[in-house]
Amino acid sequence: MKILFIPEIYYLSYESFLSVIRATRADGFDSYLLLKYPFHKAWEENEYSEQRLEVDNCPYKKIVLQDNCEHKNIYFKIINLLIILFNSFKIYRMFLREKPDAIVINSDLGGIYIRIAQELCLVLKIKIFIIHNIRNVETKTRKRKGWNKWFRFLFCDDYTIGAYTGSSIIFSASNSMRDEIVLQGIDASRIFVVGDPRTKALSLNRDNRKKNIDSTIILYCTEVIQESYGNIYTKMLNCWLLKCFTEIATIHKIKVIVKLHPREKEHLSIYSYYYDLFGNNSELFDIVGDHFDNVGIISRSDIVLGHYTDMLFQAAVLKKPIIAMNYLASRTHLIFSESIDNANEIVSHNSLETKNKIIRLIVERKYREKMVAIAIRLSSEKNGDHSNNDEEVATMIARLIRKELSKK
């Protein structure tokens, strides 16, 4: 049986997919990662090149689609619609040629060619599986009426994970993540809680080398929060953090690594702002731009700070104390569910609280041990809440895929 793994944003899905591809091939499946050109994000084309896939021993298939026009006037919108139809036909022909029994995606919400692939799967009776290990609770389900439901692949801004086709099988990372989408109307019988297939790889790749400086290293991971909260909030937040780090540095030896999100370059004014703000004090700040060794940079840090970045989960797996900033009291932009015991301990609601938590982590050994214990518990929750089952996550997913496909 053949399975195609179709990522939309590679840095969010590649490690998960690679782990499950290896497990399914070990179980006798003919599994491939689909390389779709052009990439959704231009920088990913170099990071996830064919050469890297060959080094990683990741089997792949390739499809080249026509890129859309960036202009927004009505003429180019019509051109883009024709391009979408042309590309849809290319995907359809690829499915006919490859004859996959199933596809695996990271989210059924998009982008547009992920949604089109699902529409084609419904027509061709191809099973759809979702690896749900990134929290997304912003969207709500709603039945579309009239002509709009026939063009849902173009307009998909109010769905939740698993709602697009209503028949996909979902492999959820934790009970709390499952419960969140069940509350939004997803049938619990379609969801299997299996854990996060990246967890073991993160643990194995931990960098145990000692730091070459005696300062406390704080890793501040930026996100494209301006897309959710706006540029004004983003700039104010970073001014607060600059003041916070500078004040701490007057009483404690610290080094702050500002890890820029890979997509920051899409917002050049904010991207430049980080360098203007933090780049004038090289003794206190290091700015890391195109750096993809996340495990290495986390391993050599003492404290990891961010909003809802997945780097916080990776840091928790690597047993680092984490601080999740939630200054606007958002209930949707959270890396971990609020339902978990002590989850609120890692949350900071303002700059003063952030500063105090950092100082306590530096000077109070018991507080640090407590925060590390909470991080470990949170990462365990994200890894499935099923401590009685020590089966590897990827192997479990492979077996469940085989079981579901046998029902055809």
Image (tube, rainbow, N blue to C red):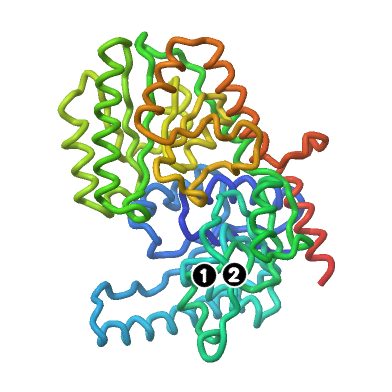
**Relative to 122, residue 173 above or below:** above
Q: Percent position (x, y) of residue 240?
A: 27, 33
Please, what is the three-letter code of the amino acid marked with disc 1?
Answer: Asp
Q: Is residue 214 left or right of residue 238?
A: right
Q: Is residue 75 left or right of residue 374?
A: left
The one of 102 and 255 positioned closer to us in this rendering: 255
- Could you tell me if residue 221 is visible in this image? yes
The one of 178 and 172 positioned closer to us in this rendering: 178
The residue that appears at 56% across and 81% down in the rendered structure is 144
- Could you tell me if residue 204 is visible in this image? no
Where is mark 1, residue-wise? Answer: 158
Please, what is the three-letter code of the amino acid marked with disc 2?
Answer: Thr
The one of 228 and 167 positioned closer to us in this rendering: 228
The residue that appears at 51% across and 52% down in the rendered structure is 332
Q: CA distance from mark 1 to mark 2?
A: 6 Å
**Residue 104 position by quadrant:** bottom right
Nearer-N-terminus badge (1/2): 2
The residue that appears at 26% across and 86% down in the rendered structure is 74
Where is mark 2, residue-wise? Answer: 141
**Relative to 105, residue 298 above or below:** above
Quadrant where the N terminus is found in the figure: bottom right
The one of 268 and 277 positioned closer to us in this rendering: 277
**Residue 343 position by quadrant:** top right
Please rate how many residues cluster around mark 2, counting C-alpha atoms within 10 Å: few if below 14, some from 14 to 19, many from 20: some
CB within 8 Å, label 1 to label 2: yes
Q: Percent position (x, y) of residue 82?
A: 38, 86
Quadrant where the C terminus is found in the figure: bottom right
Q: Residue furthest bottom?
A: 147
Q: Percent position (x, y) of residue 201?
A: 60, 35
Please rate how many residues cluster around mark 1, counting C-alpha atoms within 10 Å: few if below 14, some from 14 to 19, many from 20: some
